[in-house]
Image: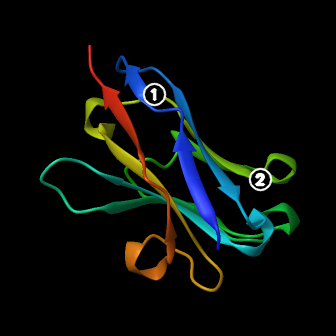
Amino acid sequence: QLQLAESGGGLVQPGGSLRLSCTASQRSIIYYNIGWFRQAPGKEREGVSYSSENISSGGTTDYAASVKGRFTVSRDVANNTVYLQMNNLKPEDTAFYYCAADTFNSGLNSRDYYYWGHGTQVTVSS
């Protein structure tokens, strides 16, 4: 059973950067599509980015319009970790961030993912 654990959240000023990590255990991430999602208080969970399992061989990545050009997803297969580099953070990026994985599905719809981490809080405030 795949297990996911997020880390790297925290408090950052507007314009700052954070790198979130999603570390998998029990199975290798090479078999999974990985999505990043976020949920702010009182709002629906929204997709931030995803990467398909074959990213290292030309697979697919995509981003929500609200983060495109600021966020970058990458994979470190040796450490079984997927990263979300977040630059030029804005107050509206404040949310609880989750990573999720699925063998078959990908994309920015949270209902397509089976495995979920417990999340990490990102707060962007001066």
Residue beneath label 1, please? 88
Please, which colouring scheme is shown?
rainbow
Q: Which amino acid lies under the numbered mark 1 shown in the image of this protein?
A: Asn
First reached walking from the N terminus: tag 1 or tag 2:
2
Give left or right: position of 85 versus 94. right
Residue beneath label 2, please? 80
Task: Where is residue 84? Give x, y as percent.
Answer: 58, 44
Residue sitting at 23 percent across and 48 percent down?
Answer: 40
Residue sitting at 74 percent across and 71 percent down?
Answer: 53
Task: Where is residue 86? Give x, y as percent.
Answer: 52, 36
Q: Which-is-in-front pick, marks 1 and 2?
A: 2
Within-10-Å neighbours for mark 1: few <14, some 14–19, many 20+ = some
Specify the farthest residue to the bottom.
104
Give left or right: position of 122 versus 63. left
Residue sitting at 51 percent across and 39 percent down?
Answer: 70
Quarter of the picture containing the C terminus is top left
Does 12 appear above or below 67?
above
Task: Where is residue 18? Give x, y as percent.
Answer: 52, 28
Does 107 appear above or below 125?
below
Give left or right: position of 124 versus 34. left
Quarter of the picture containing the N terminus is bottom right
Nearer to the camera, 116 or 55: 116
Within-10-Å neighbours for mark 2: few <14, some 14–19, many 20+ = some
